[in-house]
Amino acid sequence: MARPKTFDEQQVLTKAIDVFRRKGFDGTSIPELTAELGICRQSLYNAFGDKRGLFLDALEHYGRVEVQAKLDLLDAPGSPIENLRTVIRGWAAMAAQCPGEGCFTITAIVVNRNDAKGLAIVEEHVNRLERGYESNLERALLAGELKPDAKPARMAHSLITSSYGIALLSRLAGSSVRIGDSVAEMLDIVERNAAG
């Protein structure tokens, strides 16, 4: 009979994200993981299969938490355009909070560039957020906050590309000016299409 888990899986996944962000997948050993996560090797294997399984589960968890937080902001009551501005400004804040580590989604793209399963998880994160941008912009259009000829799908493509570009460059410590300008340009996209 299998022994019950003696740890909180969500907390372990959150800690694993931090470890993989700092050390990378290849740079992280099982002994380092068990020490930092506070679980024994057998518990890691029982819960996640192996290091790759832990990494993929951590990536799924990160996407659920981080993307959902942005979707919740985009869908919040009030002005869709103001909600969108809040999310865009949040990319600059994210970049400032973890210079050199960057967005875990970006880390995963690099680590999983030859791994179809890992890339599929990342693609779903990106697609979910892009759909959230587009849905927000469609609501803004219906609310009269955007010009009648605004193109929500095209705007969402541009915003998602800029968002993850910012996440990538946040790994470079000297990118604060670039990131600030990119956020300003994203806000300009919104302003150029705003009604009135």
Image (cartoon, rainbow, N blue to C red):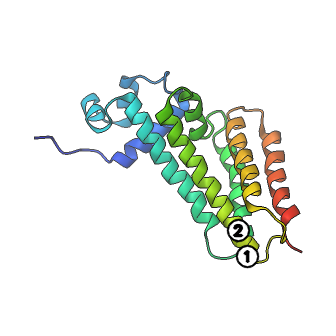
Is residue 88 left or right of 33 when viewed as pictured? Answer: right
Disc 1 element: helix
Is residue 92 left or right of 22 when viewed as pictured? Answer: right
Label ID, residue 32: none
Instruction: Please give the count of numbered marks on the rendered protein.
Output: 2
Residue at 83% x, 41% y: name it: 177
Q: Quadrant of residue 155?
A: bottom right
Circle 1: residue type = Leu
Q: Which residue is labeled 1 in the image?
A: 142
Label ID, residue 138: 2
Q: Find out whether the residues at labels 1 and 2 contact each other: C-beta distance under 8 Å.
A: yes
Q: Is residue 79 visible?
A: yes
Which residue occupies the foreground of this view, 195 or 15? 195
Crowd around label 1: few <14 · some 14–19 · many ≥20 (10 Å): few
In the figure, 180 relative to 151: above or below?
above
Is residue 175 left or right of 171 when viewed as pictured? Answer: right
Q: Quadrant of the N terminus?
A: top left
Whole-percent x, y for residue 6 in the image: 24, 44
Circle 2: residue type = Glu
Whole-percent x, y for residue 156 in the image: 72, 55
Residue at 78% x, 43% y: name it: 179
Residue at 28% x, 31% y: name it: 45
Crowd around label 2: few <14 · some 14–19 · many ≥20 (10 Å): some
Is residue 105 left or right of 172 when viewed as pictured? Answer: left
In the figure, 77 relative to 21: above or below?
below
